[in-house]
């Protein structure tokens, strides 16, 4: 049984301002919740439709009906479990190795996929511009499949951060150097741009290395790759040289 | 103004059975519609909220209100235009060069992204298992950003197709050969598996070359890459050797 007040709190967490106010976020689905439980995230409450997660204290667990779960889910299709976790304090930025910087990524699915890719390729720090979608948006958390627990994500004034950095700063542009032919380092910052507009003018000024993923289609019509696809290819290129 | 019958027809096209019955599909947004108009797709009707697409015959174009567009859109957020196109006859399968084969891809966004990637990397033929999501699903059409017009997509009995093929058949598996170290050919079939289950057992039997995208994370927890991310990396690897 979920009380009206609980429903109100939980459903409010789809909005960033309430996540900020309560310092809580939602996670749904066994896989995502398992990964978060295994990490340092602190569980506030867990709602399940059947007995599961034996490792979780009974005092934090509530068995609810499918119809109650439907009332609180942030997803189109509800799972069989929903958890509320505390938003952890932001860790300090780790300025070593490869870093991914996001210039206004707006789509939650893209951010989630990029986090999952960083986790796969052993990149432990993502820097987000302040306009980038919130990492604790339920759709982002879902798309990370739990890898949000293993990548440090910091929101900063991106222009200022890049201006202060002494690293090489890479960005994908039309007409840059062919990424397949370039020697790529094991440290540096890789900037990825907004879905509709790419890397913004003020961030472009900070880029020291413009790179391009060559296009192989016969017709030169495909305007661009989706940013998550571009991220996959770029990170693969940086790592394959190791 | 859109009549009730038109609304009924248009909204029915989110369902595969009605697309099949009417041999029509939906496309939304300027970019997608432009790409389809430029290609060989035959326009049935175009609905716009303001004067646009001057190249389209007035007899095929209807100016409608924003609220009417909201009634007919298949998207959460309506654009300013919606088109109905005829489903073209399936072309014959082109058995040359690199071919991508999909073993039960269920997510429309994933199929759309894979089509866009094939277009980028100059792969003109995709073979889909019969259980793969329909390419004319509105969310697929949307995610392709119009590149659906430039890639030939065929639905077949995948096991039978692979069994008859004389090409090398590649598939991504845990514990396969490191894709970064393998010489990759310019022709062959690349099989990509279902989001939850990967490549199915009966299709696995047909794979002649098992390949793996190495994982670089410190912790060996990330279970897998999203199938669209894996496609991006695999296609990039096949093409970069050209």
Image (cartoon, coloured by chain):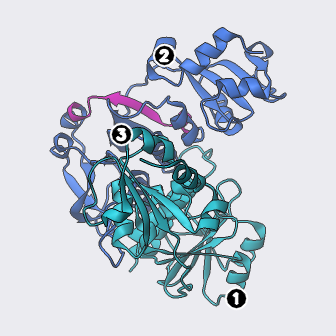
Chain colours: A blue, B cyan
At numbered mark 3, what does the secondary structure look like: helix, strand or loop?
Answer: loop
User: Which quadrant would the C terminus of chain A be assigned to in this image?
Assistant: bottom left
Q: Which residues are magenta?
A: A147-160
For label 3, count other residues whose C-alpha is less than 10 Å away and answer few (under 14), some (14-19) or many (20+). Answer: some
For label 1, count other residues whose C-alpha is less than 10 Å away and answer few (under 14), some (14-19) or many (20+). Answer: few
Q: CA distance from mark 1 to mark 3?
A: 51 Å
List the single residue furthest toward the right. Answer: A51
Q: Which residue is more in the foreground, A100 or B154?
A: B154
Q: Which mark is residue A96?
A: 3
Q: CA distance from mark 2 to mark 1?
A: 57 Å
Question: Residue, x 38% and y 40% (percent of image)?
Answer: B66
At numbered mark 2, what does the secondary structure look like: helix, strand or loop?
Answer: helix
For label 2, count other residues whose C-alpha is less than 10 Å away and answer few (under 14), some (14-19) or many (20+). Answer: some
Seen in the picture, residue B164 relative to A122 is either above or below; the reply is below
Disc 1 chain ID: B
Question: Residue, x 75% and y 76% (percent of image)?
Answer: B205
Q: Quadrant of residue A144?
A: top right
Q: Which residue is more in the foreground, A125 or B169?
A: B169
Residue A20 lies within the magenta run? no
Q: Which residue is more in the foreground, B85 or A156?
A: B85
Seen in the picture, residue A231 relative to A178 is either above or below; the reply is above
Disc 3 chain ID: A
Seen in the picture, residue A191 relative to B193 is either above or below; the reply is above
Q: Which mark is residue A18?
A: 2
Residue annotated with mark 1: B164
């Amino acid at each position: 049984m979920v009380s009206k007040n609980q429903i109100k709190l939980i459903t409010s967490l789809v909005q960033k301002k309430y996540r900020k106010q309560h310092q809580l976020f939602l996670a749904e689905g066994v896989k995502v919740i398992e990964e978060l439980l295994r990490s340092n995230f602190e569980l506030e409450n867990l709602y399940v439709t059947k007995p599961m997660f034996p490792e979780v204290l009974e005092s934090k667990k509530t068995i609810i009906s499918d119809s109650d779960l439907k009332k609180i889910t942030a997803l189109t299709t509800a799972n069989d479990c929903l958890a509320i976790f505390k938003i952890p304090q932001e860790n300090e930025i780790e300025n070593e190795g490869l870093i991914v910087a996001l210039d206004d990524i707006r789509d939650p699915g893209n951010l989630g996929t990029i986090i999952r890719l960083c986790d796969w390729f052993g990149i432990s720090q993502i820097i987000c511009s302040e306009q980038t979608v919130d990492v604790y948006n339920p759709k982002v958390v879902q798309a990370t499949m739990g890898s949000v627990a293993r990548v440090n994500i910091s929101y900063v004034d991106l222009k200022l951060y890049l201006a202060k950095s002494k690293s090489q700063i890479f960005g994908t542009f039309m007409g840059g150097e062919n990424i397949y032919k370039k020697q790529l380092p094991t440290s540096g910052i890789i900037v990825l741009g907004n879905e509709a507009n790419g890397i913004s003018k003020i961030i472009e000024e900070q880029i020291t290395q413009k790179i391009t993923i060559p296009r192989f289609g016969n017709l030169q019509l495909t305007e661009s790759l989706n940013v998550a696809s571009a991220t996959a290819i770029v990170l693969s290129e940086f790592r394959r040289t190791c």
